[in-house]
Amino acid sequence: MRVVVLTGSGVSAESGVATFRDRDGIWSKYDYREVATPEGFAADPALVHGFYNARRRALQTVAPNAAHAALAKLEEELAARGGALTLITQNVDDLHERAGSKNLLHMHGELAKARCGACGDIYLCKDDLGVDSQCAACGQVGAMRQHVVWFGETPMFMDEIEDAVMAADLFVSIGTSGSVYPAAGFAAEAHSRGVPCTELNLEPSENAWAFSDARYGRAGEIVPQWVEELIAAL
Ligand code: OAD
């Protein structure tokens, strides 16, 4: 069985990572045009660096929760039976990999990586970035940016995602409001191909119509339950 799972910030909420559009979400405190667009970075790079530096530092204070652990277990159980789990995440945190997920596509990039705008080199980044950061590869100063996707930029791994969704026997969306495309369109694409689609979220998402099965509750509770049921049925 080939399962494709798409996760959003709701899967990390119980770890203490903020979601975006909930009442106290990130976009209630920041204007996304200022901190998550190429135009915002050009206008005030120090502000944008500060926004991501704070989120990267905060990752050191959080840990994967039961939902992340259950998805890592599902990947192992499917692989042991000749199947596969492709985990697509919109999250820039590293909680899925810290829980043990391996076949993971960070379509919106990663807080744990930096990229040089001059030479394109990508490397692991634990420290703060700033306007005076220097690229270790080409030596350019001032061109370093977070390796994340901003609004107006193309998400990463779109070819791999397309292949995985086309080959899926089951598509599952977890902890995402379904308001940002192209991720929000994956369920509709799977649905139109006749693939069963399941939604696990705190509340119905904007794409709720595309899901033939839906469970609503906290990811830390409903994801492990759903994983155990799926494994038992394999
Ligand atoms: P949103 O904030 O839009 O949606 C989070 C979803 O998680 C909502 O539907 C909540 O109901 C749900 N949720 C909250 N707590 C939960 C919990 N404990 N268990 C289960 N579900 C819970 O965040 P995303 O859908 O991830 O992109 O946002 C998608 C993209 O928009 C992000 O990747 C980011 C943002 O702007 C960029 O920055 C490019």
Image: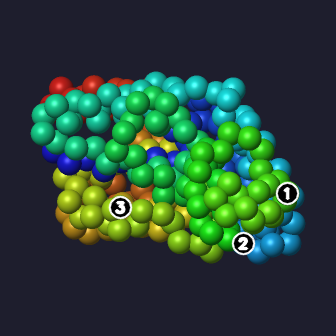
Side of 117 relative to 174 (left or right): right
**Which x, y percent locates residue 209?**
38, 60
Crowding near the residue tagged with mark 1, few <14, some 14–19, many ≥20 C-alpha atoms within 10 Å = few
Q: Which residue is mark 3?
A: 161
**Which x, y percent locates residue 41?**
78, 67
Label 3 to label 1: alpha-carbon separation: 35 Å
What is the number of the mark on residue 118?
none
What is the number of the mark on residue 38?
2
- Residue at image point 87% right, 66% down: 44
Q: Which residue is mark 1?
A: 132
- Quarter of the image for the N terminus: give it: top left
Mark 3 secondary-structure assignment: helix
Mark 1 secondary-structure assignment: loop
- Residue at image point 26% right, 31% down: 76
Instruction: Establish if 84 lies above or below 140.
Output: above
Residue 191 visible in the snapshot: no
Identify the image's colour scheme: rainbow, by chain, secondary structure or one colour. rainbow
**Circle 3/circle 1 CB separation < 8 Å:** no
Mark closer to the observer (2, 1):
1
The kind of residue on which mark 3 rests is Ile
Say whether disc 2 or disc 3 marks the residue closer to the N-terminus: 2
Label 2 to label 3: alpha-carbon separation: 24 Å
The kind of residue on which mark 2 rests is Pro
